[in-house]
Image: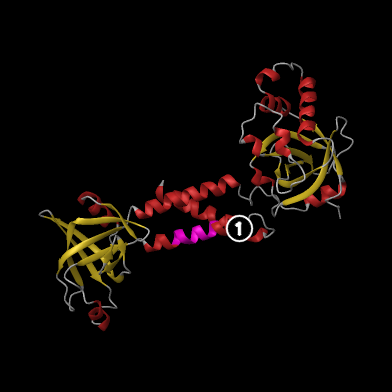
Amino acid sequence: MANNYATQTWGYFLTGQVSENLIHRLEGQEALNNYSESWQLHERAKDLIFTLVGVESCLFYVRRFNIDQHNNQREIWTLTLASDKNYFDFANRLNQFDKLSLSDKQKTLQLWVTVYQNNSGCLGIYRIILVDAEEGRKDAFSVPFHIKLVPDTDRNIGIPKEAFDRITSQPFCKDYVPTENQIRRWGDFLRVEKKLIEKKQFCVRFISHNFTNEKRFINFTIDKNFAFGIHSNLLSNMLKKEGLIERILSAIGEDIQLVTEINSAMISRGIYIGKIEKIINKNENIYLTIEIDEELIGNSRIENINLPKEAYLLYKDVGSIVQLQWKERALTELKEVFHTHNIKLIWVNFSLMLLKQDQYKKKYY
């Protein structure tokens, strides 16, 4: 087995526009204009790589990303400079480049390379970028190696066989590991979903009703001057008549609760009484018809409700709230396992988040 922490020499060559892009990124267009020939660009890029990582070995986390879509005999790997170890001051090296912003100087280095599946040749570096330092942390798909990068024009140095075998024993991470940006976007998406749920909820006061123990349906007369949206367990924005009617119509067939007391906008615990049957908008008045739960009809429980003449009706989209809470827990767990070796758990959480996101898009877009 390869000794991952012993210094290893890996050969590389530069391909495509990687040299041009690196010079432009670190030194700007004016510096790039000084090099007109391809060999000049590559030589300058090698100097810059030397400036970034030096002549000694650096700890890289190597991840097996995917099969090369342009050549299925090759794989794509990423080499990310470790940011969770303190021995290498990469920020100080970035400080040498005035073109970089302050935020860029807090990032770490990432190389995108191609390698042949039969381990012929060496690393073909086709992309060199600065990424969030978070990506320079060890995770379930990374293999640590202390690597000394050496230009390998003749491609004779290559990659040590034991290291190559160790990396290719890993699963491809493309379809498994979410990026930090994806996790951040899922957090944003859950916050939007929460707002959409809250836009459907309401609390209204009723000022009369026609309840009797024999009736299956109750008509409540609504005080349209006391109608509010719900944020968490608090009254939020006051609803106009049109907005209230829209929310009630969208909640037809949903469960509704009786609330007997509201203190300082804090809603007390509600009692489930039935489902919203219909709304009647007549002569400037709003009547809400509730179908009493069958288990309450003819049951002593209905008497225990002791329905007052005036109180409050609360609609909370409980089903969606529970699903949202489940997804929030899944996202929290995903963040927690992201830097562990529990590949199965990462995959389960990642898959479930994708499923919920897909269901959300189908529902709202």
Kindly identify the residue that appears in the image at 73 percent across and 38 percent down: 90
Classify residue 54 as left or right of residue 68: right
Q: Main secondary structure of the magenta part?
A: helix
Which region of the structure is painted magenta? 323-331
Classify residue 54 as left or right of residue 351: right
Determine whether the residue tagged by mark 1 lies in a helix, strand or loop: helix
Position above or below: 190 against 323 = above
- Indicate whether residue 235 is drawn in magenta: no
Measured as percent of width and height from the top left, residue 149 is found at 82, 37
- Indicate whether residue 326 is drawn in magenta: yes
Q: Which residue is mark 1?
A: 336
Measured as percent of width and height from the top left, residue 341 is found at 70, 58
Q: Nearer the viewer, residue 51 or 155?
A: 51
Kindly identify the residue that appears in the image at 54 percent across and 59 percent down: 330
Q: Nearer the viewer, residue 288 or 264?
A: 264
Residue 127: quadrant of the picture: top right
Residue type highlighted by circle 1: Glu
User: Could you tell me if residue 111 is visible in this image?
Assistant: no
Measured as percent of width and height from the top left, residue 336 is found at 61, 58
